[in-house]
Image (cartoon, rainbow, N blue to C red):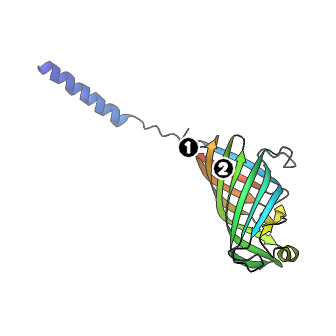
């Protein structure tokens, strides 16, 4: 009997000692970077929410853009996805003589291998001629540089495919073409 108690006591001590000196293995989250070029405007829509016959606070602009997820030197050699964006205007200011709008922006990048959803405070810009043409809800001509007039950051959530479980940030950078630079982290580790 004493012998079995000794075996149990030794086993317990070894178990406790093993747990106390064992290393915890913490896996670092898997990271991924991605650069996406905005290559062109496929369509745009203006919704005059307050029916004041002009682009103003409360109104919405939606658009579909074509994008390239592997931009080369020129940026848009291989278009392989779409970006659907929706921006609601929350503030209006003149910047360098042009109307600039702060927006609640959201959108989804759609690629064959998965989707990425983004949300941010974005910007839209419109010159006087564009402002005059926005006098009622409907289709509108958009210039890609007016959709991304200023650098801004967005939050990102992966939606299926190779991006499932990823979260992170995207920096929207104006240019020719404008780009989104993603830093993504897998919430499930590696």
Q: Image point 65% across, 53% down: which residue?
A: 117
* Secondary structure type for disc 1: loop
The image quarter containing residue 65 is: bottom right
In the picture, the disc for residue 116 is: 2
Q: Residues within 10 Å of mark 2 (few under 14, many from 20)?
A: many
Q: Image point 59% across, 41% down: which residue?
A: 30
Q: Point out the residue furthest to the left here.
A: 1
* Secondary structure type for disc 2: strand
In the picture, the disc for residue 29 is: 1
Quarter holding the C terminus is top right
Q: Position of residue 183 (x, y in %)?
A: 66, 50
Against 13, residue 185 (above or below) is: below
86 vs 29, left or right, is right
In front: 13, or 4? 4
Label whose residue precedes the other's in the sequence (2 or 1): 1
Against 86, residue 77 (above or below) is: above
Whole-angstrom CA distance, mark 2 to mark 1, is 18 Å
In front: 171, or 46? 46
Can residue 125 be seen here? The reply is: yes
Against 33, residue 123 (above or below) is: below
Q: Position of residue 40 (x, y in %)?
A: 84, 55
Q: Position of residue 173 (x, y in %)?
A: 76, 59
Q: Image point 84% across, 45% down: which residue?
A: 72
Q: Nearer the viewer, mark 2 or mark 1?
A: 2
Can residue 148 be seen here? The reply is: no
Q: How many marks?
A: 2
Q: Image point 17% across, 23% down: which residue?
A: 6
In front: 5, or 83? 83
The image quarter containing residue 43 is: bottom right
11 vs 85, left or right, is left
């Amino acid at each position: 009997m004493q012998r079995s108690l000794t075996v149990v006591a030794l086993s317990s001590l070894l178990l406790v000692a093993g747990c106390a000196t064992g290393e915890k293995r913490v896996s670092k989250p898997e990271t991924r970077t991605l650069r996406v070029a905005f290559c062109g405007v496929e369509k745009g829509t203006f919704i005059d929410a307050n029916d004041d016959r002009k682009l103003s606070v409360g109104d919405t602009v939606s658009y579909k853009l074509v994008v390239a997820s592997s931009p080369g030197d020129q940026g848009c050699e291989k278009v392989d996805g779409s970006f659907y964006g929706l921006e609601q205007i929350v503030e209006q200011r003149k910047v360098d003589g042009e109307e600039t709008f702060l927006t609640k922006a959201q959108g989804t990048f759609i690629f064959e291998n998965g989707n990425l959803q983004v949300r941010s405070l974005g910007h839209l810009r419109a010159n006087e001629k564009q402002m005059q043409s926005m006098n009622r809800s409907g289709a509108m001509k958009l210039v890609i540089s007016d959709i991304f007039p200023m650098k801004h950051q967005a939050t990102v959530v992966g939606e299926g495919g190779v991006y499932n479980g990823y979260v992170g940030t995207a920096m929207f950078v104006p240019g020719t073409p404008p780009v989104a630079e993603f830093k993504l982290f897998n919430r499930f580790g590696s």
